[in-house]
Amino acid sequence: MSQTSSRIEAVVRSDRLLRLYAYWKSKRSPSAFPSRQDIDVLDLGFVLGNLHLLEVERDPLDFRFRVHATNGVNYVKRDMTGRRVSDYEDRDYGRLVYEFYASVVAREQPRAIAEQGLMTERRVLKWEGLALPLSDDRRSITGILVGFEIL
């Protein structure tokens, strides 16, 4: 069963992801999402192995991994750095991830997901994730910072 929400605390149980969310909020201004330049990787050592950085592509909408987390590589058995979400070999998993990231762009807000047992082409999914919008132009979502915990 998959649960997604903009109410982060209602979905996320991981202390590490809640800490990432607090960090992101501290970098946000009242009127704009933080930019990639606002995020300092040295501040994120507590979550680095579970952290993706994505670039939002438009026309058509897709998401390119600028950084694919080490633990994500181990989970999907492929390094997605430089690749798009639409390139996932497991189409069911790719569709779930795409829809999650697309909801961040469409709703213009952070989103959380808890996946507790969806069977895809290749595995049963058990993880929770946090997708945090970034804006390099202070107007539109140009990137997404993603933290996850494999359950």
Image (cartoon, rainbow, N blue to C red):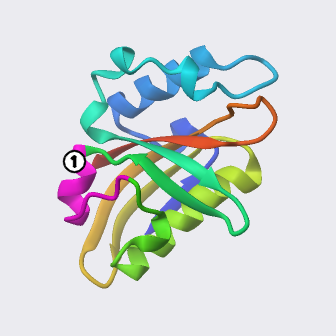
Which residue carries the number 1 mark?
71
Q: In the rendered image of this protein, does residue 126 appear above or below residue 94?
A: above
**For the residue marked with disc 1, what is the amino acid?**
Asn
Q: Position of residue 71 (x, y in %)?
A: 22, 47
Q: Which residues are magenta?
A: 70-81
Q: Can residue 151 be spotted in the picture?
A: no
Q: Position of residue 146 (x, y in %)?
A: 46, 42
- Tell me what residue is drawn at x 51 percent, y 60 percent: 3
- Tell me what residue is drawn at x 50 percent, y 47 percent: 54
Q: Position of residue 45 (x, y in %)?
A: 28, 21
Furthest-bottom residue in this view:
121
Q: In the rendered image of this protein, does residue 3 appear above or below residue 9?
A: below
Q: Is residue 12 magenta?
A: no
Count the marks: how many?
A: 1
Q: In the rendered image of this protein, does residue 103 appear above or below residue 20?
A: below
- Tell me what residue is drawn at x 42 percent, y 80 percent: 92
Q: Can residue 131 be spotted in the picture?
A: yes
- Assess disc 1: are there few (<14), some (14-19) or many (≥20) residues with their C-alpha within 10 Å of its C-alpha: some
Q: Quadrant of the N terminus?
A: bottom left
- Tell me what residue is drawn at x 66 percent, y 58 percent: 103
Task: Say which of 136 and 100 sits in front.
Answer: 136
Residue 134: which quarter of the image? top right
Q: Is residue 75 magenta?
A: yes
Q: Position of residue 56 (x, y in %)?
A: 61, 51
